[in-house]
Image (tube, helix red, strand yellow):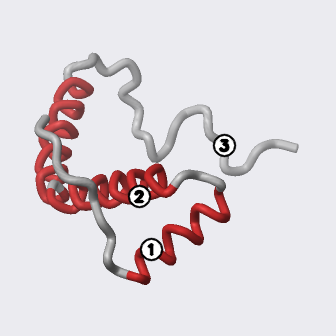
Amino acid sequence: MPTSPKLRIANDEAVRLAEEIAELTSEPLEAIIVAALKERLVRERRRATKGQGEKRVVPRNAAIADRLAAYPVVDDRSPAEPAWYDAFPAE
């Protein structure tokens, strides 16, 4: 990976915010900036691939449904009225 010149922050608000976080956490400024950039990168990647994730879920769910449908029926009673359920139990 090519090296680049050192990052210089000319925005007073950005410097103030980073210094305030550094004071609260006792972390070095570099660590705070790296953490903030990583968090932002994760959010942006998630946003960029948001539609792609939805496209993968449906086929995966369909594949699971197909596998479950291949299992043999062990109990063919109606799920609405199982034989073991008594709405009015004897006292």
> For the residue marked with disc 3, what is the amino acid?
Asp
Residue found at x 38% / y 52%: 34
> For the residue marked with disc 2, what is the amino acid?
Ile
Q: Which label was assigned to residue 51? A: none
Residue of label 2 = 33
Residue of label 1 = 15
Where's residue 32, x and y in %? 48, 56
Q: Secondary structure at mark 1?
A: helix
Residue found at x 67% / y 50%: 87
Residue found at x 24% / y 55%: 46
Q: Nearer the viewer, mark 2 or mark 1?
A: 1
Asked if labels 1 and 2 touch by Cβ distance under 8 angstroms, the answer is no
> For the residue marked with disc 1, what is the amino acid?
Val
| Of the image marks 1 and 3, the number of the one nearer the N terminus | 1
Real-space CA distance between mark 2 and mark 1, rounded to the nearest whole angstrom: 10 Å
Where's residue 26, x and y in %? 65, 54
Residue of label 3 = 86
Quadrant placement of the N terminus: top left
Where's residue 58, x and y in %? 16, 46
